[in-house]
Structure formats: structure tokens, C-alpha cells
Amino acid sequence: SFTCCSEETSAGTAVQLAVRALRLGEIDRAVVGGVDLTGDPRQLLASAEYRPASDTGTANPLAAAPTGVVPTDGAAALV
């Protein structure tokens, strides 16, 4: 059991790590989940100070050249 914190990509990263471990036979089952909620307007204002918003309207946080952030709510799970 461990915690994975990678900003907005935590859920996707956690699922990716679980799938990899399953495929490699390191584990035989996994329960994985993550969520990012943008419920507080102060969070959006604070993040705008140090993370530029995407001018394309899309985000590629794991790309070699990320385009910026797009404020959203999201969740992922794997059982």
C-alpha cells in the first residue's frame, strides 16, 4: 500500500502503476483510485499564479512539452 501524489495526474498514474504491476506479475490484484476536485475558487486563483493555463484548451501533463493546465474535476478507479 502506498500513496501516489503527482498533482492532477495522481489517478492516472496510480492506475498505470497498478496495471504495470499486474502485467509484470508483481501483484495478483489491485484496488486503485484517485480524485481531483476543484471545489474551492481560491484553489483556482492560487494555481493560476504558478501554473499557466493552457492556451489550446487541452492539457498533456505527461508530454515532453506540456501545454499547460485545464482546470477540471476528475476521477479514476481500477478494481
Image (spheres, rainbow, N blue to C red):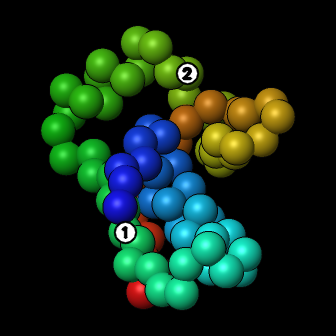
Q: Position of residue 49 (x, y in %)?
A: 41, 12
Whole-Å distance between the Cαs marked 2 and 1?
27 Å
- Residue at x 68%, y 70% (from the top left corner): 20
- Residue at x 55%, y 21% (from the top left corner): 52
- Relative height, residue 27 to residue 61 (above, below): below
Q: Position of residue 54 (x, y in %)?
A: 62, 33
Say if mark 2 contacts mark 1, CB within 8 Å: no
Asked if residue 19 can be seen in this view, the reply is: no
Q: Which residue is mark 1?
A: 33
Earlier residue among tags 2 and 1: 1
Q: Amino acid at mark 2?
A: Pro
Q: Residue furthest right?
A: 64
Q: Which mark is residue 25?
A: none
Q: Amino acid at mark 1?
A: Gly
Asked if residue 5 can be seen in this view, the reply is: yes
Q: Secondary structure at mark 2?
A: loop
- Residue at x 70%, y 43% (from the top left corner): 62
Left or right: residue 28 versus residue 37 is right
In which quarter of the view is residue 17 placed? bottom right
Q: Which mark is residue 52?
A: 2
Nearest the eye: 69 or 26: 26
**Quadrant placement of the N terminus:** bottom left
Left or right: residue 40 versus residue 59 is left
